[in-house]
Image: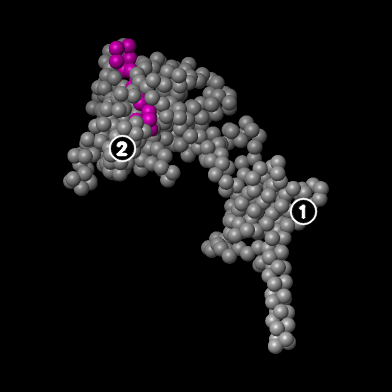
């Protein structure tokens, strides 16, 4: 009995020692005195926890599978193309850690059970911290600046006007212009030359034009045998361009080449996101309907001898993956008589739509561009239109427009911001 008890005891002690040593290996933390005496790293519940020391902020936590997936060594990550080159087909979901070391210069080094070693600089890790504040910072400062919605009342205080030559010649002005478009959704550029290439020059200064079935540049003027309602002198109701495209253009750059001397030809505009927000707060049932009901948008016609029939089914209010406003579709001239929803959804949809349009007009502002002005706005967000006008033989209203996509604009914003801050992009 005594003997068996002592064997048991030895086994127990041995197992305990073994567990302790495994545990010790897993939580191995080597401090580097005196350089990084405050920096420590350990494993807890599948995460690596990096303690930065009392003055350096809260602990950083990273799932070990994510660390393994993002190993920066030259076998796993191709520096020149900034591409992951390991795990082409499968991820090492096990990702077991043998030991962690913080001895190198502000680096956390991990030795994995399969004899692979990964090193991460503290800056790189901090930049990718999963804490809510850091994710928010990345989304708002690097991904996309959040939109500032505005009402009719706020409009006068939000008008920003840029000089054509400044925007074309100075990077700070270009960045300020693009940030204003991203945040406020519209702005003006003044003193453009009397040249038909103004909209093209501005677009190409950002990146490149988004071509549509209406060409790279489109001329908004009263045309013989017009094939688009915009090419009449009639009033143009509040709308967004190209709702009938899956890849709707990001922004409109409209150069007022010649303005009408008639009383009309004024621009109207309302913040479509603000209108949606009012609907959400004041008429939540209508909001639900406009978010959920797909509408058939279409464009059946011809431009420059090329026939087209575009169709896109999409709600009036489109949200992104975070539930934020992504895109407004509204254009009564481009809403199809085909409405491919169940019968019983039709009448309720009209009621909701009618309220949305009523709110948009309640929030609409009016202004008249002068020749040489450029009106630029977010085509996913701004409802815009114009009042009727009348050409004379000596005065024909003539606008020249181009579109640019948001992918191109956001990319330019990031590049310009990084240049300005002399920051590395990765
Ligand atoms: C358009 C448009 C505005 C105007 O052509 O789509 O919005 O002022 N035009 O003519
Ligand atoms: N234009 C100006 O969505 C539309 O068809 C609005 C677009 C013809 C390119 C007008
Ligand atoms: Zn690696
Ligand atoms: Zn338009």
**Any atom of ligand 2 within 8 Å of the CB at mark 2?**
no
Residue 261 appears in which quarter of the rendering? top left
Look at the image and give the residue range highlighted in magenta. Answer: 260-276
Q: Going by the picture, which residue comes out furthest to the right?
A: 34
Q: Which numbered disc covers residue 404?
A: none
Against 260, residue 240 (above or below) is below
Label at residue 31: 1
Please state which of residues 160 and 317 is positioned toward the viewer in this rendering. Answer: 317
Identify the secondary structure beneath mark 2. Answer: helix
Whether residue 122 sits left or right of residue 406 in the image: it is right
Magenta highlight on residue 340 = no
- Please state the horizontal and vertical placement of residue 333, each as a whole percent of the image: 25, 32
Residue at the spot of label 2: 284
**3D distance between C-alphas at marks 2 and 1:** 57 Å
Residue under the point 41% across and 26% down: 150
- Mark before the other along the chain sequence, 2 or 1: 1
Q: Position of residue 178 (x, y in %)?
A: 50, 29
- Circle 2 crowding by C-alpha within 10 Å: few under 14, some 14–19, many from 20: some
**Residue 128, percent from left and from top:** 60, 47
**SS of the residue at dot 1?**
loop
* Residue 83 appears left or right of 337: right
Depicted 247 relative to depicted 13: above or below = above
């Amino acid at each position: 009995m005594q003997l068996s008890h002592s064997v048991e005891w030895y086994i127990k002690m041995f197992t305990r020692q073994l567990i302790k040593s495994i545990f010790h290996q897993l939580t191995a933390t080597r401090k580097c005195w005196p350089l990084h005496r405050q920096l420590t790293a350990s494993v807890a519940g599948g995460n690596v926890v990096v303690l930065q020391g009392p003055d350096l902020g809260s602990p950083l936590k990273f799932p070990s599978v994510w660390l393994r997936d993002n190993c920066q060594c030259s076998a796993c990550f191709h520096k020149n193309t900034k591409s992951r080159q390991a795990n082409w087909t499968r991820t090492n979901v096990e990702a077991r850690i043998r030991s962690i070391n913080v001895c190198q210069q502000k680096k956390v080094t991990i030795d994995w059970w399969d004899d692979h070693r990964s090193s991460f600089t503290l800056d790189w890790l901090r930049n990718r911290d999963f804490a809510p504040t850091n994710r928010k910072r990345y989304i708002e400062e690097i991904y996309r600046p959040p939109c500032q919605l505005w009402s009719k009342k706020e409009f006068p205080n939000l008008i920003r006007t840029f000089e054509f030559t400044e925007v074309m010649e100075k990077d700070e002005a270009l960045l300020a212009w693009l940030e204003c478009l991203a945040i406020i959704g519209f702005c003006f550029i003044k003193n453009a030359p009397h040249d038909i290439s103004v909209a093209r020059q501005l677009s190409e200064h950002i990146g490149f034009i988004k071509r549509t079935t209406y060409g790279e540049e489109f001329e908004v003027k009263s045309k013989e045998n017009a094939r688009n309602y915009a090419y009449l002198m009639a009033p143009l109701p509040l709308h967004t361009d190209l709702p009938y495209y899956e890849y709707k253009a990001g922004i409109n750059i409209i150069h007022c080449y010649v303005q009408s001397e008639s009383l009309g030809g004024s621009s109207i505009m309302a913040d479509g996101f603000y209108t949606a927000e009012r609907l959400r707060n004041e008429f939540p049932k209508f909001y639900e309907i406009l978010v959920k009901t797909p509408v058939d948008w279409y464009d059946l016609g011809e431009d420059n001898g090329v026939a087209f029939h575009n169709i896109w089914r999409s709600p009036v209010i489109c949200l992104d993956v975070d539930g934020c406003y992504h895109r407004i579709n509204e254009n009564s001239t481009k809403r199809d008589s085909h409405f491919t929803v169940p019968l019983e959804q039709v009448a309720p949809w009209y009621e909701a739509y009618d309220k949305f349009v009523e709110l948009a007009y309640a929030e609409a502002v009016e202004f008249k561009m002068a020749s040489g002005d450029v009106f630029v706005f977010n085509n996913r967000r701004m409802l815009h239109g114009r009042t009727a006008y009348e050409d004379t033989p000596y005065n024909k209203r003539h606008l020249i427009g181009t579109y640019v996509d948001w992918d191109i604009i956001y990319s330019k914003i990031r590049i310009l911001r990084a240049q300005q801050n002399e920051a590395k992009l990765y």
